[in-house]
Image: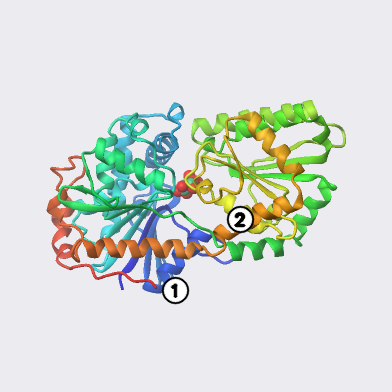
């Protein structure tokens, strides 16, 4: 069984007291079973050469965590400017929010290569490597250029845009070709996988094969949808327990019988928060009778404040919420409570169970696990109503929610009105349909399905995945070759064994 090496920008090291979310737990569990290494950024910026070049290693059971600091310059160029200022809006098709600076792209690629250099000595010949998310799109090519022959899987947690949108960023072809050094490329939905395959064909010249795979430089790359799941049963238990805790009781008392509308998001321009507040405002304007019967609590946890668009969003939301409260609020009732502070997983689960409406209206979202958590948190005897953007990946599975266009204030207002008035039998019917969709899924099942598919793609390449010569630096001029020359020999000789995590 191959050791599983997970690579992601952020690394979740289990620690006493902190309760990690389902994905981190699932990845840990997968790694525990077969031995694992989790490698990535420490979350710190430093100009100390030792901490930026030598990984800090923490052992936890059979899993090793290896993290390095970024330099301040790398933090600014790679993380803030290119990952979050260019790629994040691009992946969400929000090109008007996208900045582009060639120097940041170069820094992004350089960090992907530097991380590959640091990872290389930690790798073993029998590893299977699973790289996560948009920060590390160049890493499959960087590892191959350094002679790594292990199976490489890549999973994108965000949506993937259409070829036209993608080509709005210069050098889109290079980014796609870098990714095509992986053996398996996974997306949240079939739509994202299709967008990628179409882009790889049109922009990078890959051949589309029957069954969804791609071929380039004599190699086949499997492309597929692997929708991320939560642990619904566990979340349901957490929410039930939390509904008796002091945080939930305090919230319940403060509502004094009003219906709770709840939004839980990072404060991020993709989450549709401006439009959501506009929709709520429309409801207050057009349905005065509802005014004192409800309270909207929007948790918008502060995020990525170094990026200009996130600061503007914060300012806009402060202004819009102030205006809603001063226009419609009264001495003893405020329509909206907006907070930029997040809450613990337990607290949020308790709030979700309390909420008559879960309002989840991203402009676009890879999946949106809040939507699934809201469903899991409900009391089956008296469930709330999920209002969900039709542009969230989760909408593909959660069609029994009230689906809305997140930019249409009237549609949001109508859905809120409908949900507030919805009879208990209809709420139960809708909730049951949603619960049936998710109840047998798990985060671990998601991880397993990806890792098994990675094993299959390794095998379908004849027991070895990559000849380093196939993707030489001549094919990918931006990827350096020195380390490949140094390290290639010892790694390329060993055929990868098959993966199995059942
Ligand atoms: C999204 C991304 C993750 C990222 C998270 C938090 O969910 O897909 O990769 O870690 O946002 O963002 P941050 O910039 O704080 O890591």
**Residue 210 visible from this viewpoint:** yes
Q: Identify the element where label 2 is drawn.
A: helix
Question: In the picture, which quadrant includes the C terminus?
Answer: bottom left
Q: Please state if 102 lies on the left or on the right of 349 as rendered.
A: left
Residue at image position (52%, 37%) is 270
Q: Identify the element where label 1 is drawn.
A: loop
Q: Please state if 28 lies on the left or on the right of 234 as rendered.
A: left
Marks 2 and 1, how far apart at CA: 39 Å
Residue at image position (50%, 42%) is 365
Residue at image position (41%, 55%) is 226
The residue where tag 1 is placed is 61
The residue where tag 2 is placed is 433
Name the colouring of the figure. Answer: rainbow
Bin the neighbour count of mark 1 within 10 Å (Cα to Cα): few under 14, some 14-19, many 20 and up. few
Residue at image position (21%, 53%) is 220
Q: Is residue 150 above or below residue 206?
A: below
Q: Position of residue 237 (x, y in %)?
A: 66, 66
Disc 2, ligand 1: is the CB inside 8 Å? Answer: no
Which badge, 2 or 1, is on the more N-terminal residue? 1
**Residue 203 visible from this viewpoint:** no
Q: Is residue 166 above or below residue 12?
A: above
Bin the neighbour count of mark 2 within 10 Å (Cα to Cα): few under 14, some 14-19, many 20 and up. some
Toward the right, the furthest residue is: 332
Q: Please state if 256 lies on the left or on the right of 140 as rendered.
A: right
Choose top left, top right, bottom left or bottom right for residue 262. top right
Q: Position of residue 455 (x, y in %)?
A: 30, 65
């Amino acid at each position: 069984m191959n050791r599983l090496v997970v690579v992601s920008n952020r690394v979740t090291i289990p620690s006493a007291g902190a309760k990690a979310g389902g994905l981190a737990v699932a990845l840990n569990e997968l790694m525990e079973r077969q031995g694992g290494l989790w490698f990535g950024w420490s979350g710190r910026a430093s100009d100390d050469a030792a901490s930026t070049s030598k990984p800090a290693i923490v052992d936890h059971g059979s899993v090793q965590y290896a993290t390095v600091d970024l330099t301040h310059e790398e933090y600014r160029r790679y993380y803030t400017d290119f990952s979050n200022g260019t790629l994040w809006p691009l992946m969400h098709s929000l090109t008007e929010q996208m900045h582009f600076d060639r120097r940041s792209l170069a820094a992004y690629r350089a960090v992907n290569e530097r991380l590959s250099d640091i990872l290389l000595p930690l790798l073993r010949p029998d590893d299977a490597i699973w790289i996560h998310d948009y920060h590390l799109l160049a890493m499959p090519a960087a590892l191959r250029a350094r002679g790594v022959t292990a199976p490489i899987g890549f999973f994108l947690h965000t949506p993937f845009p259409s070829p036209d949108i993608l080509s709005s960023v210069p050098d889109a072809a290079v980014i796609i070709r870098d990714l095509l050094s992986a053996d398996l490329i996974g997306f949240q939905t079939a739509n994202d996988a299709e967008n990628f395959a179409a882009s790889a064909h049109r922009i990078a010249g890959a051949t589309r094969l029957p069954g969804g795979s791609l071929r380039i430089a004599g190699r086949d790359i499997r492309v597929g949808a692997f929708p991320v799941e939560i642990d619904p049963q566990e979340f349901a238990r957490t929410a039930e327990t939390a509904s008796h805790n002091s945080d939930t009781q305090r919230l319940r008392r403060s509502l004094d019988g009003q219906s709770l509308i709840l939004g839980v998001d990072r404060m991020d321009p993709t989450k549709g928060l401006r439009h959501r507040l506009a929709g709520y405002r429309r409801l207050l304007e057009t349905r005065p009778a509802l005014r004192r019967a409800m309270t909207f609590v929007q948790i918008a946890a502060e995020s990525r404040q170094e990026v200009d668009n996130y600061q503007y969003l914060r300012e806009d939301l402060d202004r819009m919420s102030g205006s809603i409260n001063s226009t419609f609020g009264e001495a003893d009732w405020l329509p909206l409570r907006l907070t930029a502070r997040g809450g613990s997983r337990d607290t949020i689960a308790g709030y979700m169970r309390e909420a008559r409406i879960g309002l989840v209206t991203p402009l676009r979202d890879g999946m949106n696990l809040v939507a699934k958590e809201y469903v899991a948190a409900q009391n089956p005897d008296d469930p709330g109503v999920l209002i969900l953007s039709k542009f969230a990946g989760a909408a593909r599975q959660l069609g029994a929610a009230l689906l809305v266009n997140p930019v249409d204030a009237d549609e949001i207002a109508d859905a809120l009105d409908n949900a507030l008035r919805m009879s208990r039998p209809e709420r139960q019917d809708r909730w049951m349909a949603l619960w049936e969709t998710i109840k047998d899924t798990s985060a671990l099942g998601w991880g397993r399905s990806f890792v098994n598919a990675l094993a299959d793609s390794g095998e379908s390449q004849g027991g070895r995945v990559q000849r380093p010569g196939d993707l030489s630096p001549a094919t990918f001029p931006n990827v350096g070759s020195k380390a490949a020359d140094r390290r290639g020999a010892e790694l390329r000789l060993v055929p990868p064994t098959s993966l199995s995590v059942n």
